Amino acid sequence: MNKPALLENSHTEKELAAELRKDERTVMRWRYLRIGPPFFLIGKTPYYDIEAARAWLRARVVRPIRRRA
């Protein structure tokens, strides 16, 4: 099914889960707990802006702590 042009740069939960190689229920849980990428609803269907999801991933980068010698 082709997406309307307005939703071209967004993913459904299923598509986002596939991109992240996570179970769809994991992405659903992130949304429920408000710890996942930002989303918007059209009716009851959540969508994730691709650029916002990328920004969310970049914000989650953990830098290793350098140990003292």
Image (cartoon, rainbow, N blue to C red):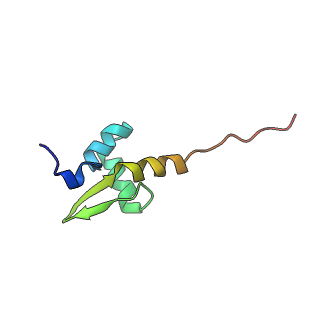
For this orientation, the residue located farthest to the bottom is 43
- The residue nearer to you, when weighing 2 against 45, is 2
Picture quadrant of residue 18: top left
Q: Quadrant of the N terminus?
A: top left
Residue at the outermost right position: 69
Image spot of residue 43 (x, y percent):
18, 66
- Residue beneath the point at 30% across and 62% down: 40
Q: Residue 15: x percent and y percent?
A: 27, 43
Farthest-out residue, top: 69
- Quadrant where the image shows the C terminus: top right
Locate residue 40 relative to residue 69 in the image: left or right.
Answer: left
Q: Is residue 68 found left or right of 54 in the rendered image?
A: right
Up the image or down, 39 lies above or below 26; here it is below
Q: Is residue 16 above or below residue 39?
A: above
- What residue appears at the point 31 percent right and 48 percent down from the top-left corner? 25
Count of numbered labels shown in the rendering: 0
Residue 38 % position (x, y): 39, 59
Expressed as whole percent of the image width and height from the top left, the position of residue 31 reads 36, 58
| Residue at (28, 55) in percent of width and height | 47
Toward which corner of the image does residue 23 lie, by quadrant? top left
Task: Point out the residue furthest to the left here.
Answer: 1
